Amino acid sequence: MPSRPAAAEAVTPEAVTPDPPGSIDRPLLTQSWLDVALVHWAADPADVAELLPAGTRPDTFGGAAHVGLIAFRMHRVGWLGLPSVPYLGGFLETNVRLYSVDGDGRRGVVFRSMDASRLIPVLMGRIGFGLPYLWSRMSFRRVGDIVLYTGSRRWPGPRGAGNRMALRIGERIGEPTELEHFLTARWGLHNASFGRTLFLRNTHPRWPLHRAELLTCDEDLVTAAGLPAPAGDPVSVLYSPGVPARFGLPAGPLRAG
């Protein structure tokens, strides 16, 4: 049996595909992401690398890393194929995320913060999976083609960190660009959990995407997540009505890169 490469950069990353590479027949977790705003800025890979879990490196496009501010409505969260739990199965969430690739060439996302409007899911995510969930006051409103997301962090801090973001939804995208595929077609999650780096695979239908105009973006979640403040305009602003998603059991631990 050939030995595994010694460093994360030794393997060519897997191809970026708009559809998942396989299915998850027995999911650990099911959920839907609705009214999804995806705003991305280019970032220096050096700023990103030090914030990623062991065994991963920045996944770059055109030499740049990217930081995403993703706001959405979480809907119908269920465990082990069981129905969604009323009240706890739906809440608002805003993520700051980065893009990673591991020593096996698997591309994924790394969450630097996950603000959510329900305390119990926040505690479950932090205690059960070591995910950076935070409890926040949040609201969502849609008027015509305008969507508005707001949030203000409660716990654990920094208290008051948040966002106020408004988008105007534009035309449906027939064929996303290579960058749009790169930023949205991510079929896994890298997470440092209790001293190990794990990979959680996910599947969902192909994203229905719309181009969008960023009308307002007053936020300090990116700097609260340990990154430099975004410089200049976003390189991508998208909206999606949403998709249902399935997560498999964690794979790992990864070896350190």
Image (cartoon, grey):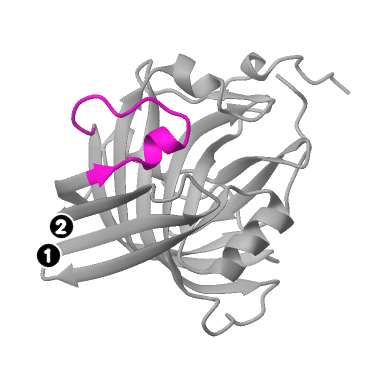
Q: Are marks 2 and 1 in contact (CB under 8 Å)?
A: yes
Residue 156 versus residue 44 in the image, above or below:
below
Q: Position of residue 163 (x, y in %)?
A: 30, 50
* Res 59 visible: yes
Q: Nearer the viewer, residue 178 or 130?
A: 130
Which disc, if any, is residue 169? 2
Element type at marker 1? Answer: loop
Q: Position of residue 16 (x, y in %)?
A: 46, 35
Residue 138 placement, left or right of 193: left
- In the rendered structure, does residue 180 fall within the stretch colored magenta? no
Q: Amino acid at mark 2?
A: Ile
Look at mark 1 in the image and give the residue it sits on: 145
The residue shown at (61%, 82%) is 83
In which quadrant will I find the C terminus? Answer: top right
Residue projecting furthest to the bottom: 86
The magenta region covers: 218-234
